Image: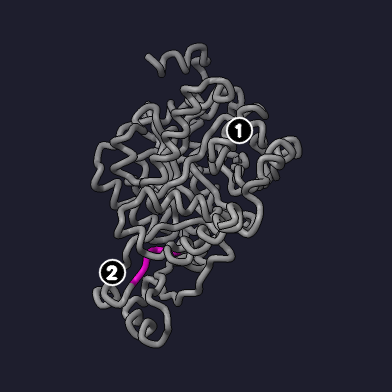
């Protein structure tokens, strides 16, 4: 029924198969990029790559992908878009990421696998799993996702809270990013129920060590409300419309966020950082030697582009199996880190927190003792105790 509504009025002489053939070959396919804003720093953190089809620009991209699904050719179209996105990645500005939509079934398709595996390093790439279809083969999909992660990619779940992107799918896939659908955000500036929902999703994301990204921010009031709720990432026309190049945050949006940053400016976690040695995931057998030769209690295991993958201690180093650790952005405040640690299991909270920059690269660790000492010092200075 939906497909019939989408294609009502299309001329009979117009051939969908021919158009999809062209788009799958990269003909008539263009890309635009919408900025994704770091709400706590009022800067562009990344971009979402959006497909545009110049053969029939009067039809929306949703229409094109819906017809491709109807013909059983969604993977071919996804592969063409991925190919175009990865070709542009070398021009991506430093410390910014690039997201691209892929349907769950496409991750297992040979066309998409060939494109993804032609690129040895997927650092700074976020693969968005779309909500358009159910995941039929969950074990195979999870294995495909893990292969992408090992090569530096991060995983986002698109339109969390709607369609198939419900709680069960979130728990199954454990994404790095949860994208909150625009339908759940529209009117958040005055709708307390929607504000509470975004706050709840944010708390849930913290528990699974993910970030939320709210879509559809189109007004200053909505941006301010999300910033006050502690939303880390957002996108929408208020911050910037999709463009052919890498655009910056709109001046009006920057001005609107700037006066909300007073409690968040400063050095973030920088003053708390400690240096810990690193080993690459392909060379973990030397971890015990590195530990013995240094004064550190842990070694940080990194992948390509210095992306942290976990910790090795004197005990775990012998097994050569990295321990999952909380990863915090260096721009986070100590209070934010303390809150995140309060939501994890006691044993996990005792491990050092690995700290990365906005590009996902390892920069240091913060121990629980050092964090507590800092917060105690701040309390004493504020209250004179």
Q: How many numbered markers are drawn?
A: 2
Q: Residue at x 43, y 50 (%)?
A: 340
Main secondary structure of the magenta stretch = strand
Q: Position of residue 141 (x, y in %)?
A: 30, 46
Between 155 and 349, the one nearer to me in the picture: 349
Q: Position of residue 84 (x, y in %)?
A: 55, 47
The label number, if any, that marks residue 236 in the structure image: 1
Q: Which sits earlier in the primary sequence, circle 1 or circle 2?
A: 1
Q: Look at the image and say whether residue 309 sits in the magenta stretch.
A: yes
Q: Residue at x 52, y 35 (%)?
A: 214
Q: Residue at x 42, y 78 (%)?
A: 296
Would you say 218 lies left or right of 145 here?
right
Span highlighted in magenta in the image: 308-312
Report helix, strand or loop for mark 2. Answer: loop
Between 370 and 33, the one nearer to me in the picture: 370
Q: State the image quarter where residue 325 is shown.
A: bottom left
The label number, if any, that marks residue 347 in the structure image: none
Q: Residues within 10 Å of mark 2 (few under 14, many from 20)?
A: some
Q: Tell me: residue 152, above or below residue 225.
A: below
Tell me if I can see residue 210 in this picture: yes
What residue occupies the far bottom of the structure in this picture? Answer: 293
Q: Look at the image and say whether residue 275 sits in the magenta stretch.
A: no
Q: CA distance from mark 1 to mark 2?
A: 41 Å
Q: Position of residue 46 (x, y in %)?
A: 58, 48
Would you say 55 lies left or right of 121 here?
right
Between 15 and 170, the one nearer to me in the picture: 170
The label number, if any, that marks residue 321 in the structure image: 2
Say which quadrant the N terminus sits in.
top left
Q: Residues within 10 Å of mark 1 (few under 14, many from 20)?
A: many
Report helix, strand or loop for mark 1. Answer: loop
């Amino acid at each position: 029924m939906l497909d019939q509504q989408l294609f009502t009025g299309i001329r009979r002489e117009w051939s969908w198969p021919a158009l999809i053939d062209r788009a799958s070959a990269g003909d008539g396919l263009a890309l635009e990029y919408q900025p994704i804003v770091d709400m706590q720093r009022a800067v562009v953190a990344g971009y979402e790559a959006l497909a545009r089809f110049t053969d029939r620009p009067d039809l929306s991209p949703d229409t094109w992908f819906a017809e491709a699904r109807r013909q059983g050719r969604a993977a071919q179209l996804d592969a063409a878009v991925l190919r175009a996105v990865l070709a542009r990645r070398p021009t991506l500005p430093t410390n910014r990421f690039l997201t691209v939509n892929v349907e769950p079934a496409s991750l297992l398709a040979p066309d998409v696998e060939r494109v993804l595996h032609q690129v040895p390093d997927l650092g700074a790439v976020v693969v968005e799993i779309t909500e358009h279809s159910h995941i039929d083969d969950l074990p195979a999909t999870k294995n495909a996702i893990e292969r992408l992660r090992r090569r530096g990619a991060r995983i986002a779940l698109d339109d969390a809270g709607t369609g198939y992107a419900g709680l069960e799918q979130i728990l199954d896939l454990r994404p790095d990013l949860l994208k909150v659908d625009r339908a759940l955000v529209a009117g958040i500036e005055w709708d307390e129920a929607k504000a509470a929902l975004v706050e709840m999703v944010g708390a849930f994301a913290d528990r699974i060590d993910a970030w939320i990204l709210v879509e559809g921010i189109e007004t200053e009031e909505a941006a301010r409300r999300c910033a006050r709720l502690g939303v880390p990432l957002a996108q929408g026309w208020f911050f910037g419309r999709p463009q052919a190049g890498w655009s910056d945050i709109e001046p009006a949006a920057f001005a609107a966020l700037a006066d909300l940053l007073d409690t968040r400016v400063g050095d973030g976690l920088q003053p708390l950082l400690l240096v810990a040695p690193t080993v690459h995931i392909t060379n973990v057998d030397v971890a015990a030697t590195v530990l013995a030769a240094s004064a550190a209690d842990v070694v940080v295991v990194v992948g390509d582009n210095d992306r942290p993958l976990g910790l090795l201690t004197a005990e775990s180093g012998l097994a050569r199996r990295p321990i999952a650790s909380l990863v915090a952005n260096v721009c986070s405040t100590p209070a934010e880190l303390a809150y995140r640690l309060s939501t994890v299991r006691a044993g996990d909270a005792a491990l050092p927190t690995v700290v990365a920059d906005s590009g996902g690269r390892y920069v240091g660790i913060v121990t629980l003792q050092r964090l507590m000492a800092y917060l105690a010092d701040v309390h004493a200075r504020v209250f004179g105790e």
